[in-house]
């Protein structure tokens, strides 16, 4: 019978496998897609939100999976890669906007609307993403050690709730303070955090299956003992 390997060998921890790469790619795709989808406001059942809400929570679910299977150091690497990819997409989009459109092209206004996010919103989004994602990974890692690897469901929900709440608490005030009334901001923060966390709960059965499957095929289950949680130690994987 194949036993789960509680990884201790540093060389093994530094190995990048195909499942890890696929999870990392999906993480980045969800982040970039959510930012682009944020430009559409939707209303379902009387609840108003942005279309990005259907994609962004998936990044937290993937973050949970990576932190649970490969540990905080691998999650840190993926979080910074997501930050870098988002920054590059925004930078390339701004360059494209500055280029003159062809006289016969009629899509200039729509293109600028989708890709021309205000610098204030971009800054708010990147800051909120970093803080929320690292809180999520940190809490997931620490709770795993404290619970000796048990109660994954509770750990996933709690870490996501804290991460998503921090994300909303940072994003909305930076992006909309002075534009949207304070009471409306508080409602938006609470609504977004609740909906994103509810998303995690609804999809939790799938998350559990994915984690179990990856642990089985990877034959690994990392416990973050004696590691540095410094978010800047990207090379330490």
Image (spheres, rainbow, N blue to C red):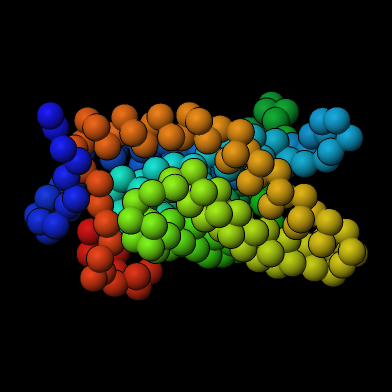
Identity of the residue drawn at 82% across and 61% down? 185
The quadrant in which the N terminus is found is top left
Q: Nearer the viewer, residue 102 or 79?
A: 79
Residue 73 in view, yes or no: no
Residue at figure coordinates x 25%, y 46% from the top left:
221
Question: Is residue 231 positioned above or below 3 on the image?
Answer: below
Observer-nearest of 92 and 221: 221
Q: Residue at x 43, y 56 (%)?
A: 140
Q: Is residue 82 visible?
A: yes
> Residue 3: x and y, percent?
16, 38
- Residue 169 appears left or right of 55: right
* Closer to the camera in the image, 98 or 115: 115
Q: Position of residue 25 (x, y in %)?
A: 37, 38
Placement of the C terminus among the 4 image quadrants: bottom left
Q: Position of residue 31 (x, y in %)?
A: 52, 44
From what the image shows, is residue 236 above or below residue 26?
A: below
* Left or right placement of residue 209 versus residue 215 in this view: right
Residue 231: image x %, image y %?
38, 69
Residue drawn at x 79%, y 34% is 42
Residue 74 in the image: above or below residue 101:
below
Q: Is residue 12 left or right of residue 102?
A: left
- Image quarter for residue 233? bottom left
């Amino acid at each position: 019978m194949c036993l789960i390997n509680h990884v201790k060998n540093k060389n093994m921890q530094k190995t990048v496998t195909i499942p890890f790469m696929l999870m990392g790619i999906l993480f980045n795709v969800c982040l970039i897609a959510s930012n682009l989808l944020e430009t559409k406001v939707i209303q379902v059942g009387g609840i108003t939100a942005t279309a990005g809400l259907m994609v962004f929570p998936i990044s937290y679910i993937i973050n949970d999976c990576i932190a649970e299977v490969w540990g905080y150091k691998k999650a840190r690497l993926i979080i910074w890669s997501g930050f870098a990819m988002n920054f590059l997409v925004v930078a390339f989009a701004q360059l494209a906007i500055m280029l003159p459109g062809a006289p016969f092209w009629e899509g200039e206004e729509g293109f600028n609307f989708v890709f021309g996010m205000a610098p204030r919103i971009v800054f708010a989004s990147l800051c909120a993403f970093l803080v929320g994602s690292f809180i999520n990974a940190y809490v997931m890692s620490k709770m795993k050690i404290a619970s000796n690897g048990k109660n994954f469901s509770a750990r996933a929900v709690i870490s996501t709730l804290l991460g998503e709440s921090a994300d909303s608490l940072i994003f909305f005030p930076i992006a909309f303070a002075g534009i949207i009334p304070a009471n409306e901001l508080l409602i938006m923060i609470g609504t977004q955090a609740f909906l994103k966390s509810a998303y995690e709960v609804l999809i939790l059965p799938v998350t559990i299956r994915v984690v179990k499957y990856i642990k089985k095929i990877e034959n690994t289950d990392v416990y973050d003992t004696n590691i540095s949680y410094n978010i800047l130690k990207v090379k330490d994987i």
